[in-house]
Amino acid sequence: MPKISRKGANLPTSPIRKLAREATLTKKRGVEVYHLNIGQPDLPSPNKALKAIKSYEETVIAYGPSEGTQSFREKLVAYYKQHDIDVDTDDILVTTGASEAIIMALDCITNEGDELIIPEPFYANYETFAAACGVNVIGIPSDFENQFALPSINTIEAAITPKTRALFICNPNNPSGYVYTKSELEALAQIALKHDIFFIVDEVYREFVYDGHTHMSVLQFDGLEEHAILIDSMSKRYSMCGARIGCLITKNKEITHAALKFAQSRLCPPTIAIHACEAALDEPQQYLTDAVEEYQKRRQTAMECLHGIKGVEVAQPKGAFYCLVRLPVSDSDHFAKWMLESFADNNETLMVAPANGFFSGDATGKDMIRIAFVLNVDKLKRALELLKIGLVRYIKEGYGD
């Protein structure tokens, strides 16, 4: 039988979706599954976006420009201006989700065997994207006890080699919810300049910051124009994950010219999705204000419930809608699978994301899960009650530490 490629065989499995088959089988047995494994918002998408889809009047769903329509990019420029981010339409390449933006960025700045430095924990698919591009991820550990703040600058700088092409962070962070401070970002910017490497920042959770913390964009730093690459998406901000519209933004013209060639090879981002997302940008600011307030309530609920579970520790998220939770178990993969296959309470169970996949080491995060607090308060309370009951039963069956 013909063999598949080493690349295909060795790509890491998503910790977010790796138990999807087990969840499907559980549902087929008639058990309701509460999903805290994936950052799928349940808030309604903007009315203007939904109306734009329903009222689409073109008789042909045609190709659009490879870089995205001019009108959509003009609206993005206006959006970024509201956040004190000064960009032009020529700085923006519209992509099929932030995922494609990341892959295009890596394709533009790396060669096979090059390295990315990423503080851990990081969004699991970064490692998948890097592997697909033949790039090695160098993870720099941060501490649970320090709420996953940026590791020491000396440690990060010591990891730089001739193969290092970029520093890469997510701000606010997925999966920890950490929001990087201005001084931390400045320190990373200085490293990028000193070593003449790129600084990539995934800012898809920009709006979702809490407790008086503020978000600062990589494109707000003077002198970093040739080094900064911003990754963004409409998915979380407007509860439009299925639209698959993101963007790659940089003032480095060599990158934009190279990225456009990759964009032309896949022809264009989805025409109807851009139409809907352009309408979403016309939604009143109150939509986002209400969304942030709702996630603050959910975060508070999650923290209260988790602090009430014996043996559980949680890192307090400052942004996004995730948190990392340390459990009194040695193998969160086994626990998550057990919850789907062997546990139910009143015919209900819970799906979580084992956290090992958010770290580059084989053993790191094995006692943690990531929780996405994307369910309404009542469902979230029940989901975390299932976690509490499930943990007690799991440990009674002899699976604890």
Image: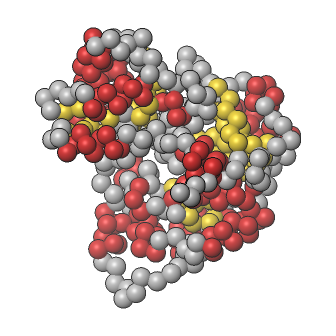
The residue that appears at 70% across and 47% down in the rendered structure is: 135
Q: Nearer the viewer, residue 82 or 3?
A: 3
Q: Nearer the viewer, residue 205 or 95?
A: 95
Q: Nearer the viewer, residue 38 or 330?
A: 330
Farthest-out residue, left: 346
Farthest-out residue, bottom: 59
Q: Is residue 300 left or right of residue 130?
A: left
Name which quarter of the figure residue 141 lies in. top right
Name which quarter of the figure residue 306 lies in. top left
Answer whether residue 284 is visible to the viewer in this image. no
| Image position, residue 316 (x, y; %) | 46, 24
Farthest-out residue, front: 1
The residue that appears at 20% across and 28% down in the rendered structure is: 344
Tell how many labels.
Answer: 0
The residue that appears at 40% across and 87% down in the rendered structure is: 60
The residue that appears at 59% across and 44% down in the rendered structure is: 10
Q: Is residue 221 left or right of residue 235?
A: right
Is 230 placed above or below 394 here?
below
| Image position, residue 42 (x, y; %) | 31, 48
